[in-house]
Image (cartoon, rainbow, N blue to C red):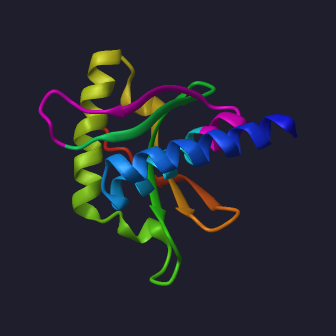
Amino acid sequence: MQFQFLYRVADAARHRYRARHSTPEQAQGRRGEDLAHRFLRNAGLTIVARNFRPRSGSGELDLVAWDRQTLVFVEVKARASADFGSPARAVDTDKEKQLRRAAGEYLRRSGTPAEQARFDLVSIVLCEPPAIEWIKDAFPVSRRL
């Protein structure tokens, strides 16, 4: 209980700093990633990378984690409100292609077979308290990665 209070205080301070030193959209996205990171860690995943960018510069993996023997590529979508639907709706086919390219490079560099990976989506509405939805296997992993 005490740690939750400390996490909230640290999150608020970090968010205020980011709000002053970046665009509102960037600050909101980073806050969403912080919340998703903690949420997934509490769910038992081991986070191994954050904001992984492939050498090609195409795309970015928000979080990479291990869920037992499965390598999980996590896309985080955060919105201030759900007025225009779930944040998860922002992941379209173009975004999926970018994520697949970045994941393919990560898999090649780590030596992990594509059969051992999945794509998850964490959708966050930044109300108080934040509403977090975790969608496992949000879209299929192409075996050609």
Q: In the picture shown, does residue 100 fall above or below 50?
A: below
Residue 102 x/y as whole percent: 26, 37
**Relative to the observer, which residue lies in front, 8 or 97?**
8
- The relative height of residue 82 versus residue 5 in the rendered view (above or below) is below
For the C terminus, the quadrant is: top left
Magenta residues (range)? 38-58
Splitting the image into 4 quarters, where does residue 70 fall? top right
Q: Which residue is rendered at x = 31% and y = 38% of the image?
A: 143
Residue lying at the far bottom of the rendered structure: 83
**In the picture provided, is 75 more to the left or to the right than 14?**
left
Q: Quadrant of residue 114?
A: top left
x, y (%) of residue 61?
35, 39
Give percent across and percent down for residue 85. Answer: 48, 80
| Nearer to the camera, 93 or 23 | 23
- Residue at screen point 27% across, 21% down: 108
Residue 106 lies in the magenta-colored region:
no
* Residue shown at 45% from the left, 65% from the top: 88
**x, y (%) of residue 32?**
50, 52
Left or right side of 66 for 97: left
Q: Residue furthest left?
A: 56
Lateral position of residue 50 relative to residue 101, left or right = right
**Residue 95 higher or lower than 117, as above or below:** below
Q: Residue at x 78, y 43 (%)?
A: 5
Residue 42 within the segment the image draws in magenta:
yes
